[in-house]
Structures are given as C-alpha cells and as structure tokens.
Amino acid sequence: MANLQIKGIDNDIYDHLKALAATEHRSVSQQVLFLVRAYLAGTNHSNSIKTPAEVLLELSGSWEGSRGPEEIKENVMVIKKLKDVPFANLQGYENVKKKIVIGPDDGSKEIVLRYFSLKPGGKSPHHSHDFPHLVKIEAGNGIMTDAMGNDHPLQPGDYVYVNDNETHQFRNAGSGPFDFICIVPQRGEV
C-alpha cells in the first residue's frame, strides 16, 4: 500500500490532525480529505472544485510503491458523515431537500447515493424515468404511490425497488421529516 506524505507538514500539525481524526473515527488521510473538501466547499469555487483524491494527490510529496498517482487516485476510499454533507440546490420541489452523499465528485463512476428529507407536505412528482432506484427508509412515515395510484405505507427499515420506467411518487405522510436513502445510476443524477 502506498504511503502518503504531505510536503511541509510539521509534527505539531500532524499530531493535531491525528487527534482530530481520532475524535471523528477517521484516518489521518480521511481527515485531510474532509478538511480540504470542507474548505473548498466554503470558498464558493463550485465550478472548479476538485475531488478529494485530486487535491490529496497535488499535496502529496512522495509515494512508495510502483503504482502511479492515477492508479492510486482510482482506489481512494471515501467515507463521509451525513451531517457533513451539505444540501444540494433542489428547485421545483416544495418541502424536499436532497444531499448527494456519494457521487461523481467522490470518484463514483456508476452510482450515486442520495439522501432525501421531506418535510410534512413534501412530495416528489408522480413521475417515471429510464433508470431504477434503490430506496431505504431512514426516518418518519411516508407513502409510495405506484402507477395504478395505489398507496404503499413506508416506515424506517423498509426497502423499495423502483424499476426503470415505473411511475412512482414518494410523499411525507407524517408530522415530522420523512427521510430516505436513494441510490441511482449516475445518469439518474443530473
């Protein structure tokens, strides 16, 4: 496995990063990725934000082993905490918020893991598209309406598979937030 070294880092900074990483149950490398990502997100460079792997590669001082930077970049694992992921700009949906937890910016080339939170009264349109969904209900009570208009109650721990071109709608049926994880192919997150 490659050993990542960061140019110009002194022992005090490293010790501080190590302690901070331990409190968040991350490795030092994961903590550096988290801090760089948080910094870039806060600087409003949305058009030029690089993936954490690209930033870390630029900061790297040396690699041990025969793998080059591109191969190493392809194999960087990404671990995130939901609370650290900002809500995406979602227009046209009333009382619905979305987070892109893992996606292309994290190196995922095929799938996107999204987290939706629907406030009371929140709902998706009754729609279909040419890609499937995998859904896990995390919190609250909701309803999934199928193509025939049948309502299916949903609660935490329920799983839903929505096939390609299947008409569906998710809506909050409770008095608190209705939250769910939704995994789609990359083409489903535009």
Image (cartoon, rainbow, N blue to C red):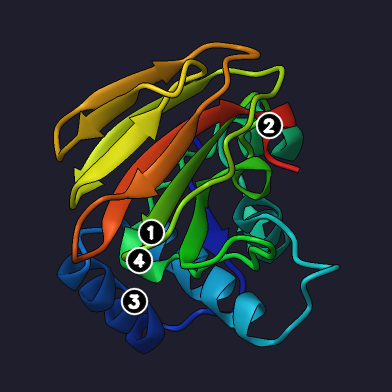
Image height check: is 168 above or below 130? below
Distance between mark 2 and mark 1 Cα atoms: 19 Å
Marks 3 and 1: CB-CB under 8 Å?
no
In the rendered image, is residue 142 in sight?
A: yes
Question: What is the crowding at mark 1: few (fewer than 14 residues within 10 Å), some, or many (at least 20)?
Answer: many
The amino acid sitting under disc 3 is Leu
Read off the residue under disc 2. 188
Residue 93 appears in which quarter of the rendering? bottom right
Residue type at the position of mark 1 = Leu
Q: Of the residues shown, which amino acid type is indicated by label 4? A: Lys
Instruction: Decide if residue 21 is on the left or right side of residue 1.
Output: left
Give the residue pinned by disc 1: 118
> Is residue 18 shown above or below 157?
below
- Residue at screen point 64% across, 39% down: 107
- Mark 3–mark 1 Cα distance, whole angstroms, equals 36 Å
Which structural element holds mark 2?
helix
The image quadrant that residue 31 belongs to is: bottom left
Q: How many other residues sit within 10 Å of disc 4, few (<14), some (14-19) or many (≥20)?
A: many
Residue 135 or 58: which is nearer the viewer?
135
Q: Position of residue 44 (x, y in %)?
A: 73, 83
- How far is mark 4 from mark 3, CA to CA? 37 Å
Q: Which mark is residue 17?
A: 3
